[in-house]
Image: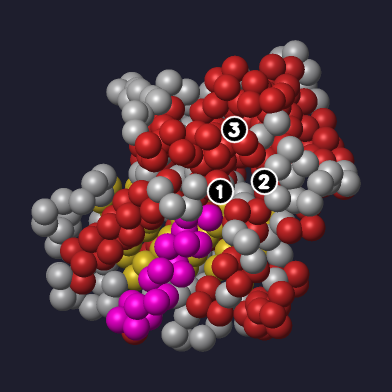
Amino acid sequence: MPTLVYFVHGMGCGTASGTVNPASSWKDSIKETTTWMTKTFGLNKTVWVDGIPATPPSADDDAIWFVPITYHNVFDDFRRNAIGQEAQAVQSQIVKTLSGAQVTRLTTIPFLWQNCLDVLLWAMDDVVTQRQVMTQVMNSITAIDALARGLKKGTVRRILISHSLGTAVATNALHQLASSPDWLAMGGMDLWVTLANVSPFLFPNSDDVYGAPLVPLATSAAVQVMLNVRNDADPIPWLLPWRAWSPPTSGDAAANWIQAKSLGRFQQRTTTGVAALTGWSPDIAQVHGFANYLLAPGVAEFLAGAMRGTLFTPAELTTLQWPVTWTTLNRLSCVRDPAALQKLSSEVGLFRSMPVPGTGVTTSGGWFQRLLDAADMLLKWSAAC
C-alpha cells in the first residue's frame, strides 16, 4: 500500500528573468524538509520522485513517495517574452486590466515580477496559461498514481499538499479528477492540506472552491479529509478578507462543510513564527514560505502521522521529543528591529480589517492591488529585519 505525497508549489518559484537557475529550485527546500521529517518522525521507506520515471521508484508496498509537481515554467516562458500571438494576447489583456502605476510596480520590482505575475497570469488567462499549467499538473498526478497502482500491492494512499497559488491549481485539479468515476471509485485524495489558501480570490464562484466534489464528507468525494493552515503573520490569505477560505461562508455547501468539521474531516489551524533547517537562513518573508508552513508545530506532526497511516499520540510525540525538536531549528532573529515579526503580525491584523476598495475583481481596486500591497509589506519588514 504505497503512499503518494504530492507537493504543489505556489507563486514565485521561477525567476524574475524567466531563465532557469541551476543553483536553486523550490524543490530543494521541500526535499530537505521531507528528509528532516523522515528523520524526526521515524518515517520508513521514503523515496523522492522528481519527474515521471519509467518504472516505479520503489517496489515496497508500504513506501512513501514524495512527489514535487512543477508548473512554474509556464510563467517563466512568459517572462522570457516568448514570441507568438498567444503570449502577445495575454500581455495585452493584462496591461488593459492594470493601472499604469500597477504596471510600473509589477515590471520594475523583481520580487513582484517574480511572484505576483504568476498569480495574475493564472487569474487572467484561463485559455492558455491555465490549460498549460493543468496539463502538466494532471499528467504528473495521474502518471505517478498509475505507477503506484501498477504494483498491485494493496490500496494506494494519496496525500495532496498545496501552497499559495498551488491551492487554486490543486482545487482545479480535484474538480477535474472528480469528473472521473474511476478516480472517485479509488477513493480520491485521502488528505488534502492547503497552506495559505488563496482559492476564493481566483475562482468566479463559491461552487468552484467549496463545491460538492471537494467536501470531505461522502465516500465518493474527491477528498476524504482536509486541513487548511494559515500563518498569523502571512497577509496573502487575506487579500479579500470576507472571501478568505472559510466553510461557514461557503454558499450552498456551508452546511456540509460544517458537518465535515464536526466529524473531524475538516480542520483549520493557525501557525506562528519562522523557522528553517540547518543551512537555510530564516527571512521574515518566509511567513508565506512553503517549507516554513510544513515545519510548523501542528502541521509537521499531523502530516507525518498521515504519511505513516496513523496520527501520532501525545505519548509518541513525547518520545520523539516533539515539539522540542522544532525549537532547535534556525529561528528568525531580526537585528535591526527585534520586534519586526510581532509588528508584521499586527500589520496583517490591520490588513484584514481594512475596507477593500472597488468590487473585488482583478482591477486596480480589487484583490490584485491587495496582492501588491501584501508583497510590499513582506519586502518592507524583510528590509527592517
* Label 3 vs 2, first from the N-terminus: 3
Name the residue at 37% across, 37% down: 85
Q: Which residue is mark 1?
A: 123
Frontmost residue, 73 versus 284: 73
| Disc 1 packing (10 Å; few <14; some 14–19; many ≥20) | many
- Residue 329 appears in the figure: no
Q: Quadrant of the C terminus?
A: top right
* Residues shaded magenta: 168-184
* Residue at image coords 79%, 51%: 359
Residue 374 horizontal side relative to residue 30, left or right: right
**What residue would you read off at disc 2?**
362
Dot 1 or dot 2, earlier in sequence:
1
Q: Element at badge 2?
A: loop
Q: Which label was assigned to residue 294? A: none
The quadrant of the picture occupied by the N terminus is bottom left
What amino acid does circle 1 point to?
A: Ala
Q: Callout 2, which amino acid?
A: Thr
Q: CA distance from mark 3 to mark 1?
A: 14 Å
Please tell me which residue is depicted at 41% across the width and 69% down the height of the picture.
Answer: 176
